[in-house]
Amino acid sequence: MNDCIFCKIIKGEIPSKKVYEDDSVCAFHDINPNAPVHVLVVPKTHIPSMNAVDESNIDAVSKVLLAIPKVASTLGLSNGYRVINNCGEDGGQTVPHIHFHILGGRKLSVKLN
Ligand code: AMP
Ligand code: ZN
């Protein structure tokens, strides 16, 4: 957990462009954006992936979901946006700290793979 890149971003140990923060949630610009707006929303507690969500951490995850529309509003995504969670190797997850991508700023392709 100590070498988790998103935990380090949350603690301010490595730089990021934060767009939202509260007691439970942090959101920052993706370093390699796939859309005009590409932000990652994460819980401040380390949860490795969607597969690790359970009754013990669902409050932290729900706070992330509650933050997403606020973050989207802050980013000016009034015409809509996409939320993506990648889970595990086949899902394309590369950072093992659960995160939700917010993508927007243009009409997105419907392609899902
Ligand atoms: P995923 O592939 O779903 O695990 O998404 C991980 C995302 O984290 C990718 O879109 C990366 O571009 C992004 N990422 C990796 N390192 C950083 C970083 N230091 N700051 C911001 N975003 C990052
Ligand atoms: Zn972490």
Image: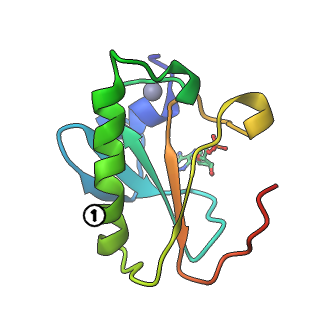
Residue 21 seen from this side: yes
| Identity of the residue drawn at 39% across and 82% down | 78
Residue 93 versus residue 53 in the image, above or below: below
| Identity of the residue drawn at 73% across and 74% down | 109
| Identity of the residue drawn at 45% across and 24% down | 47
Question: What crowding class fits label 1: few (fewer than 14 Cα within 10 Å), some (14-19), or many (20 or more)?
Answer: few
Find residue 100 and report its horizontal and vertical position in percent.
50, 48
The residue most toward the left is 23
Residue 105 versus residue 52 in the image, above or below: below
Residue 8 versus residue 19 in the image, above or below: above
Near-viewer residue (8 or 67): 67
Residue 45 versus residue 17 in the image, above or below: above
State whether label 1 is within 8 Å of ligand 1.
no
> For this view, does 7 lie left or right of residue 95?
left
What residue sits right under mark 1 in the picture? Answer: 70
Q: Amino acid at mark 1?
A: Lys
| Identity of the residue drawn at 42% across and 78% down | 77
Find residue 79 and report its horizontal and vertical position in percent.
45, 84
> For this view, does 60 lie left or right of residue 83?
left
> For this view, does 16 lie left or right of residue 50?
left
Near-viewer residue (14 or 70): 70
Q: How are the colours assigned in the image? A: rainbow
